[in-house]
Amino acid sequence: MGAEGGRLFEAFLNQQDEEAWQCALAQLEPHLHEVDRTATRIWFHFFPLALARALQEAEDPAALARQLFLEGKYRLADQIDSSHRFLYGHRYWPEVKRALIAYAHRTRAPERMSLADHIREVAAMVAEERRLEPSLTLGITAVAFMTVEQVGLEAFQATPGTIALDPRTLARTPDEVLARRARDDRQRLFYWWKYPDKVWTITFDENDPEATFRLINRQHLTTAAAQDKRPHHLRDPRCVPNEGPIPVQCRSGSCGSCWVGVLGGAEKLSEMEEYERRRLREFGYIETDEPKPIIRLACQARAFGAVSIVIPPWNGVFGRFLRKWRQQQRPMELMGTP
């Protein structure tokens, strides 16, 4: 089939809207390995399909980005091989990418299978190649499918598909990663003397042993992060010099720059209050009634244990815009407008 197969597959993916993806992810989630179950959900919040499509359809994407106060690396096309670095399955990205490209070019009638079944098939191919449980490749394969839908098959094929993980990280088993996320710090005598409260480790990049900061019991994440004086602004220009690794502008939940995903330890964060819930919805990051969701505003969340977070590479204010955009899409879908 070659190029024709690729076009058919890409056309099939372009027909998959948010509802189709929600259905597919709901089918896949019970079969995802625990190590990537939350991470996969976080990735899909970090790179929402509706926002990508709205930008693609805009007459002036740059103007729309300014209107939505988008800052940082919000374009998935600029980070095809790295956006998912916080998934355990990222280590299988080269194989997943090769398998998906080959699958896309040889698939004759993609519409005969559901989106979830296509993802399962490619994940199973990679699992067989690497002699793994398919549950370990399922999340990263779903990410690959969504990446193709957002950036296109040509752009997806154009990047090298390489990863950059040190040998120690690659050697960790899923159980070891889960154990690290669940572990709390031992409270040594020194800390009892220096601090009246317990002190916890907050990890903000599980692939970097230096990517941690200390938090005094029940501090807000941003307050604790600000004690980390390393030059994080050189890594992420959104970071304020001497204010830590979490981008922050206001510390009051007004700007939305401090949103984070919670990979491990969500239960060790304070419950979300109505203000934070409302602000997350207004920013467009998540709409949920969960008391301790996987997406939080770091300036509103207090920790009382060790937590592993992931910092998204961008931020914005687009919740209201996307709600209106979705309403405008529905009449066109009913009329069959592509």
Image: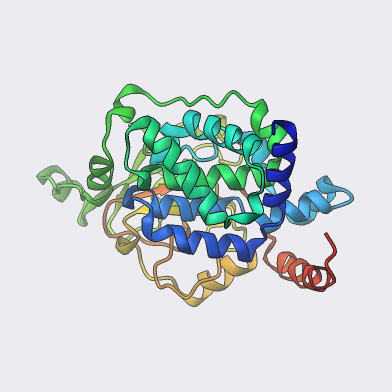
Q: Which residue occupies the extreme left position in the image?
A: 189
Residue 109 visible: yes
Residue situated in front as seen by the camera: 171 or 303: 171
Above or below — where is 334 with respect to 215? Answer: below
Give coordinates of residue 325: x percent, y percent.
77, 66
Q: Give the side of residue 86 with respect to residue 101, left or right.
A: left
Q: Residue at x 81, y 70 (%)?
A: 328
| Number of dots carrying numbers | 0
Residue 228 visible: no
Give coordinates of residue 319: x percent, y percent.
67, 65
Give coordinates of residue 2: x percent, y percent.
70, 31
The quadrant the C terminus occupies is bottom right
The quadrant the N terminus occupies is top right
Give coordinates of residue 191: x percent, y percent.
17, 46
Q: Give the side of residue 206 with respect to residue 248, left or right.
A: left
Residue situated in front as seen by the camera: 174 or 289: 174
Residue situated in front as seen by the camera: 178 or 217: 178
Above or below — where is 187 with respect to 101? Answer: below
Q: Residue at x 54, y 33 (%)?
A: 97
Q: Residue at x 24, y 51 (%)?
A: 182
Q: Residue at x 62, y 58 (%)?
A: 255
Above or below — where is 158 with respect to 313? Answer: above
Q: Give the side of residue 273 with respect to residue 174, left or right.
A: right
Residue situated in front as seen by the camera: 33 or 107: 107
